């Protein structure tokens, strides 16, 4: 058993409505010049969930999307290797809530015993791990509705 995601296992606990998102790409914020992670629901063509992220996280996400190996493991590669070594599985990642303009995320991990563990994480780290493990990226419907922006014809 490795750290590869195997679909929706135990999120959401309370039966809340969720969407599965995919990475649309990385864009540049016109105001700050910083990277913005763009996620989208494949069923919603021109609707994106933009998340401002750091440059290191943006680079890690891009490398993960490209499947490019690095000479030494990056932080996200290292964490995934630790999960594999511990025979734990990253079941999914979730964007759980929006508080004071900050998006909170969680890693949903299953131990070899079957025990489920939820770990607080930044959205950018969660997405970087999901890309590498093939785990789904889930978002609470309420959070999606607060963050989603329509960008007609946008191609990241």
Image (cartoon, rainbow, N blue to C red):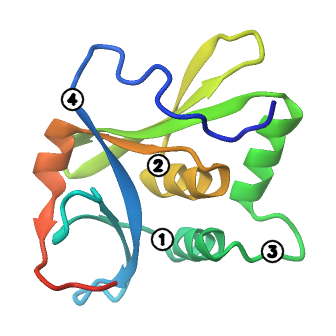
Q: Where residue 148 appears, x then y in whole percent?
A: 15, 59
Horizontal side of 90 relative to 103 (left or right) equals: right
Q: Earlier in the sequence, mark 4 or mark 1?
A: 4
Image disc number at residue 149: none
Image disc number at residue 122: 2
At a point 82% along the width and 38% down the height, the residue shown is 84
Q: Where residue 89 appears, x then y in whole percent?
A: 69, 31
Is mark 4 in CB contact (under 8 Å) with mark 2?
Answer: no
Q: Earlier in the sequence, mark 4 or mark 3?
A: 4
Q: Which residue is mark 1?
A: 54
State the SS at label 3.
Answer: loop
Q: Earlier in the sequence, mark 1 or mark 3?
A: 1
**Label 4 environment density (alpha carbons within 10 Å; few <14, some 14–19, many ≥20):** few
Q: Earlier in the sequence, mark 3 or mark 2?
A: 3
Q: How far is the residue under mark 3 from the one under mark 2?
A: 23 Å
Q: Where residue 61 appears, x then y in whole percent?
A: 56, 69
**Label 1 environment density (alpha carbons within 10 Å; few <14, some 14–19, many ≥20):** some
Q: Where residue 80 appears, x then y in whole percent?
A: 74, 46
Q: Nearer the viewer, mark 3 or mark 2?
A: 3
Q: Quadrant of residue 88?
A: top right
Q: Quadrant of residue 15?
A: top left
Q: Nearer the viewer, mark 1 or mark 3?
A: 3
Q: Which residue is mark 3?
A: 69
Image disc number at residue 17: 4
Q: Quadrant of residue 11?
A: top left
Q: How far is the residue under mark 4 from the one under mark 2?
A: 21 Å
């Amino acid at each position: 058993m490795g750290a590869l995601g195997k679909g929706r296992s135990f999120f959401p606990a309370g039966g809340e409505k969720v969407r599965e998102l995919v990475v649309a790409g990385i864009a540049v914020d016109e105001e700050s010049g910083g990277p913005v992670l763009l996620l989208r629901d494949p069923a919603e063509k021109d609707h994106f969930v933009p998340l401002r992220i750091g440059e290191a996280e943006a680079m890690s996400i891009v490398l993960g999307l490209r499947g490019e190996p690095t000479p030494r493991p990056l932080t996200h590669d290292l964490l995934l290797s630790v999960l594999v070594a511990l025979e734990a599985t990253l079941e999914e990642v979730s964007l759980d809530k929006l508080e004071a303009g900050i998006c909170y995320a969680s890693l949903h991990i299953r131990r070899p015993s079957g025990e489920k563990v939820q770990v607080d994480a930044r959205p950018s780290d969660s997405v970087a791990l999901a890309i590498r493990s093939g785990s789904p990226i889930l978002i609470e419907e309420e959070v999606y509705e607060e963050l989603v922006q329509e960008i007609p014809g946008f191609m990241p």
